[in-house]
Image (cartoon, rainbow, N blue to C red):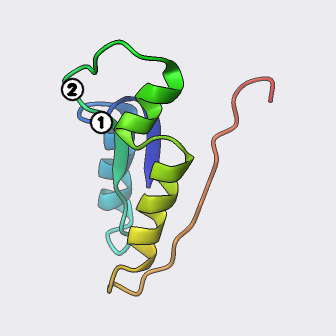
């Protein structure tokens, strides 16, 4: 699962999914980000929650993947930001 605070379609996450699918076809991967249609004005936390990019949304997606009948393992990587 590739999460990004950018648009889901045409974003970096979708590029990574395509790259991984091409090079590692047995690995199941998906991207999550903001929809193309913008949300109404809200706080950052509210926007993340609406897009499922908050901690509850991420946990839900991971649980769905874990319960998938594919029997594949889940690997979690966190991209470090510069200076962190």
Q: Is residue 10 left or right of residue 73?
A: left
Q: Please tell me in which quadrant of the rendered image residue 81 appears.
A: top right
Q: Residue at x 31, y 60 (%)?
A: 21
Q: Which mark is residue 8?
A: 1
Neighbor class of circle 2 (other Cα within 10 Å; few <14, some 14-19, many 20+) is few
Q: For the residues marked 2 and 1, what is the alpha-carbon distance in whole angstroms? A: 7 Å
Residue 71 x, y percent position in the rendering = 40, 87
Residue 59 x, y percent position in the rendering = 52, 59
Q: Is residue 17 left or right of residue 80?
A: left
> What is the count of numbered marks?
2
Q: Is the residue 78 above or below the residue 67 in the image?
A: above
Contact between marks 2 and 1 (CB within 8 A): the answer is: yes
Q: Residue at x 46, y 70 (%)?
A: 63
Q: Secondary structure at mark 2?
A: loop
Residue 7 x, y percent position in the rendering = 32, 28
Q: Nearer the viewer, residue 69 or 23?
A: 69
Residue 29 x, y percent position in the rendering = 37, 61
Q: Nearer the viewer, residue 51 or 9?
A: 51
Q: Residue at x 19, y 23 (%)?
A: 37
**The furthest residue to the right:** 83
Q: Secondary structure at mark 1?
A: loop
**The furthest residue to the top:** 41
Q: Is the residue 13 above or below the residue 71 in the image?
A: above
Q: Which mark is residue 49?
A: none
Q: Residue at x 35, y 79 (%)?
A: 68
Q: Which mark is residue 36?
A: 2
Q: Is the residue 17 above or below the residue 64 in the image?
A: above
């Amino acid at each position: 699962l590739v999460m990004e605070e950018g648009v889901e379609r045409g974003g970096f996450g979708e590029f990574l999914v395509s790259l991984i699918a091409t090079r590692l076809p047995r690995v199941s991967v998906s991207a999550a980000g903001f929809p193309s249609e913008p949300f109404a004005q809200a706080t950052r936390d509210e926007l993340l929650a609406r897009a499922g990019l908050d901690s509850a949304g991420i946990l839900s997606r991971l649980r769905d993947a874990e319960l998938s009948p594919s029997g594949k393992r889940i690997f979690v990587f966190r991209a470090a930001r510069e200076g962190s």
